[in-house]
Amino acid sequence: MARDAHLDELGEFLKARRSEISPRSAGLPDTGGPRRVPGLRREEVARLVAISTDYYTRLEQGRIQASAPVLSALARVLRLDDDQRDYLFGLAGRTPARPRRRTRQKIQPQLQRLLDDLAVTPAVVLGRRMDILAWNSLAAAPVTDFSKVPEEHRNCIRLVFTDPAMRTLYADWETVARTAQLRMEAAKYPDDPRLTALVGELSVQDPKFRQWWAAHHVTGRSVGTKELHHPVAGTLSLDWDTLTASTDPDQQLIVWTAEPGTPSHEGLRFLASWSAGSRQPAPGTTG
C-alpha cells in the first residue's frame, strides 16, 4: 500500500513541535531525571490530549487520520500558532474550525427569579461545559459553598474530580464521576478552548478520568437519584431533574427534591433552616 505523503509529513511535524515543548511548560511534574528525547515524550502528549499512546504513535507514524477534535487538542497542547494550526489541519485533510469567541454567559433573569424563590429546594444553573452559573443557598448547604470556589474553577466536573470532599459526599462517587456528561459537551463544542483545557488538565491529574474519557462513555443530563452523606443532615436520597431555558438552551436548571414525609425531605428542611442565617447572593455570570 502506498504511503500518504501528507500523513508522513503530519507525523514529522508533530515530532518537531513536541520536541519544542518542555514538560514544565506543559504543566507536567518535573521528575528531575535525564530524558532521552528533547521536549515531550509521545506518552506525555497522548495523556495531555486524552488519547491512547498507541493512537498518538500511529499518528506520528503516518498510519491513521486524525479527527478534527483530536487535531484541535493537539494544536492546544503543542501551542501552535494560527499558521501552524492551519498547516496541521491541512496535512490531515481537515478544515480548521476557528474557535469563535463566545460571549460571557449570564444567567437568564427568569431562572434567577426562580432560584431566588426556591427556599426549600436545592437548585443550580449550569451553563456550557457544565460551568456553575448560579445557585441558591440550599444548593450550597448539601454540596459546597460555591462562592468560595474561584470563578474560573466553578465547574461540576472539575469539582467532582478535584475536591476530595466530593468523594465522601456522594455515596457512589464512581458512578457519579463516570456518568458525568462532559463527553456530550465536547461533542457540542469540540473547539472550545476552555473545555479542551479542562479535559487535558483532568487527564493529567486523575487516572480514572483519563481511563473513562478514553473509553468514550456518553450520557445525557436529564433525571436521576443521588445519595449524599452529609456531615450535618446525615444520609439524603435526592431526586434530581433538569429544566432547560428556552431563551438559552445552554442554560439548565438542576433541582434536587425529596419525597414528602421521608427522612431526606426532613433533612432538606433542616438544611434550609440551618443555612438561612448565612445566605449568599448567587452570582450572575461565569466564563
Image (spheres, rainbow, N blue to C red):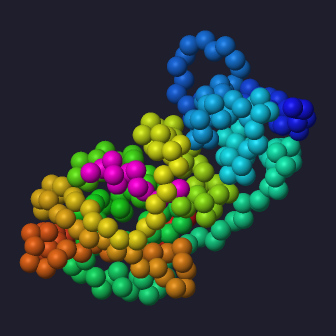
In this view, the residue in front, 191 or 145, is: 191
Q: Is residue 180 above or below residue 20?
A: below
Q: Quadrant of residue 41?
A: top right
Q: Is residue 110 above or below residue 50?
A: below
Q: Quadrant of the C terminus?
A: bottom right
Tell me the magenta residue range: 172-183
Q: Quadrant of residue 64?
A: top right
Q: Main secondary structure of the magenta part?
A: helix
Q: Position of residue 40 (x, y in %)?
A: 66, 27
In this view, the residue in front, 70 or 108, is: 70
Q: Is residue 124 left or right of residue 60?
A: left
Q: Position of residue 140 (x, y in %)?
A: 29, 65
Q: Is residue 56 above or below residue 82?
A: above
* Residue 176 sits inside the magenta stretch: yes
Q: Is residue 227 visible?
A: yes
Q: Quadrant of the N terminus?
A: top right
In this view, the residue in front, 16 or 185, is: 185
Q: Quadrant of residue 11?
A: top right
Q: Is residue 87 above or below residue 113?
A: above
Q: Position of residue 195 (x, y in %)?
A: 58, 55
